[in-house]
Image (cartoon, rainbow, N blue to C red):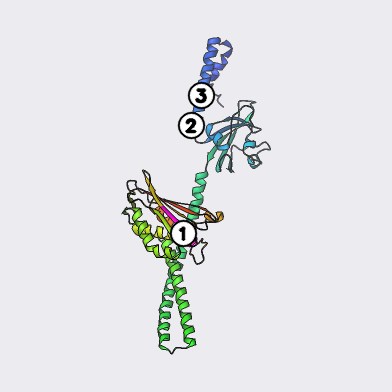
Amino acid sequence: MAAKKPSSLDKVLDRLDRLDAAGLRTLVQRLARERALLDTVFNTLQEGVLVITEGGEIDYANGAAARLIGFQDEAGAEKTLWRLVPGLRASLEGTTPNGKPAGGPVVTREFELTYPAPRVVRLYMVPFSEGEGGAPRSAIILTDITTEKRSTEELIENEKISSILLLAAGVAHELGNPLNSLTIHLQLIERKLKKLKASKEADALGDSIRICQDEVTRLDGIIRNFLEAIRPRPPDLAELNVVEIIEDVLRFQGRELADRDLTVEADLPASTPLIMADRNQLKQVFFNLVKNAMEAMPAGGKLAIRVRADDDSVFVRLADTGAGIKTEDLAKLFSPYHTTKTGGHGLGLMIVQRIMRDHGGHIGIESKEGVGTVVTLRFPQKHRRVRMLPGA
């Protein structure tokens, strides 16, 4: 086997005993420059780089590694990898008790960190030693794969949801035909019943028919809402003033608000910047949100609606004085069929979120039990390019 070619540094070190003070100073400066260069190179890497001893003590950590594992190179500080990442040493058992690979060229692990921030990290560890008889060490590369993991999990979950929704859409469509048939036959029975002489039996039968018709109408509504949620149409974008849409919805719902003894305080500047939006879809957004607020508030409640804008976006804030939302329910608000209302189908907020995404916007919800709920919508202004997002 060919002998290892000595490096330029090896040649200098061989002449170390013959160097004078000036030569030694030059050598030290050269070594300092090379160390600084290596530090700069390693600290530009996104991956974390560690060098550890057989016992897990950290000899070197670049900036990325320090950020990943919360390492601080302070005098007297604990610098053992096994202490900074509890459980890692145990996961490496089967190499050696010290966590040093025995025989195998590399060790690869994936683990979760909760400090200094929740993330998933891939570890790649290679053993080495410094020359003959040198102390065994390991070089470790740490890669933050949190986004990669989440993207993969979301992709799998989205594929599952798509398959389920496709199947459910077919079932919903098939249910529509018998419901139409039931509606027609119930109408025929009702007409024939009206031709019979009035009696208690006829009245009772008429009541039963009306109950059946109401149930068919309710089922038809559930199917219609479901199909609308899973088979959305792309928005027909046009220049709109969001204030005009809100005013239209409030006029339409004014009677119901008055009947429930609810007041609306609206701060709707006519000079609000234009947005690109689908008028009918935006009406559906505000109709659903105002309806939710109404149903959450007792008589005497108040709904405050405020519109404002900055240089890029238009914001709509709807705050009610209703019962609020439980903490455990907040995370489920946009899930299909999750509802806390009797008779609710649980698709309203899911549809709202989809429409906002299709408009390049965002919806945020804050709530506190016994105080109320605040819904904030953000729309990009007309001069901002709208990035169409796939519907959820």
Question: Looking at the image, which is closer to me, 191 or 181?
Answer: 191
Using the rendered image of the protein, determine whether residue 244 is visible from the camera's viewpoint.
yes
Image coordinates of residue 10 in percent, x first then y, are 55, 19
Quadrant in the picture for the N terminus: top right
Looking at the rendered image, the disc whose residue lies closer to the viewer, 2 or 1, is 1
Q: Earlier in the sequence, mark 3 or mark 1?
A: 3
CA distance for labels 2 and 3? 12 Å
Disc 2 is placed on an element classified as helix
Residue at image position (47%, 84%) is 203
Q: Residue furthest left?
A: 239
Answer left or right for 260 relative to 128: left
Q: Quadrant of residue 103?
A: top right
Image coordinates of residue 289 in percent, x first then y, are 44, 58
Disc 1 is placed on an element classified as helix
Residue at the spot of label 2: 44
| Part of the protein shown in magenta | 294-305
Residue at the spot of label 1: 293
Image coordinates of residue 17 in percent, x first then y, are 59, 12
Using the rendered image of the protein, determine whether residue 314 is visible from the camera's viewpoint.
no
Disc 3 is placed on an element classified as helix
Residue 36 numbered mark, or none: 3
Looking at the rendered image, the disc whose residue lies closer to the viewer, 3 or 1, is 1
